[in-house]
Amino acid sequence: MGLHRPARAILASALLLLASCGINSIPTAEETAKARWADVQNEYQRRADLIPNLVATVKGYAAQEKAVLTQVTEARAKATAINITTDDLSNPERLRQFSEAQNQLTQALGQLRTVVEAYPDLKSNQNFLTLQAQIEGTENRISVARRDYNAAVQAYNTRIRTFPDAIGAKVIYGSKPMVTFEAAGGAEKAPSVAF
């Protein structure tokens, strides 16, 4: 026996309501945000991978600048020691720690750039110029990756807070808002470094 018209109408309405509660869109938005976070981590890792080569190149020219080179190496170690999992994307404190460590590395690289000014031969060294260009390009890629992550988090957070997806987000998934990437304190002031 088939369903009677009222039963079919109720079933169709229930399916429509279920489909409009974010059954597919919430996990899709969440996975997009997680993928964008992976892009952010990838770019920070690329920068961390370039730093030992940059330090080694500068070390050959600026042996007396050991303190700055040590500071860059230590900042890199701290920055790579903080691992953020996708579960941490709802934890503002963990993201703040990550951001601070990355900011310390950025500041250490700024000091290294200042040291380079004292060594004209280094500034014309092809290895240094190549590494400098790669790190500058990576900094730009980090900026784009953070922007894309924040856009994905905004889309996800909006989806889980607006009707009708908010129903599915709370009832089915227990979704929590994700945290956007925020600049570290003092980032509004541009460092005064020049090559």
Image: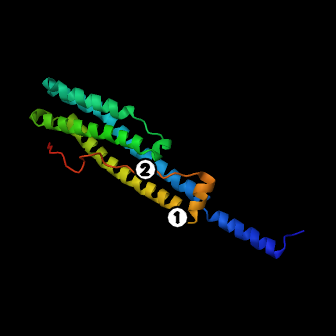
Q: Which mark identifies residue 162?
A: 1
Q: Secondary structure at mark 2?
A: loop
Q: Which mark identifies residue 179?
A: 2
- Can you name the residue that lies furthest to the bottom here? 5
Q: Camera-side residue: 33 or 115?
A: 33
Residue 126, can we see it?
A: no
> Mark 2 or mark 1, which has the lower sequence index?
1
> Would you identify the image quadrant in which residue 167 lies?
bottom right
x, y percent for residue 113: 17, 38
In the rendered image, the quadrant that contains the C terminus is top left
Residue ID at (71%, 67%): 14
On screen, residue 181 versus residue 171, left or right, reads left
x, y percent for residue 75: 28, 32
Amino acid on which disc 2 is placed: Val
Q: Residues within 10 Å of mark 1 (few under 14, many from 20)?
A: few
x, y percent for residue 152: 45, 55
Q: Residues within 10 Å of mark 2 (few under 14, many from 20)?
A: many
Residue ID at (19%, 35%): 112
Q: Secondary structure at mark 1?
A: loop
On screen, residue 65 versus residue 179, left or right, reads left
Q: Which mark identifies residue 153?
A: none
Quick check: 9 above or below 183?
below
Amino acid on which disc 1 is placed: Thr
Q: Camera-side residue: 128 or 42?
A: 42
In the rendered image, the quadrant that contains the N terminus is bottom right
Residue 154, can we see it?
A: yes
What is the CA distance from the residue labelled 2 to the residue labelled 1? 17 Å
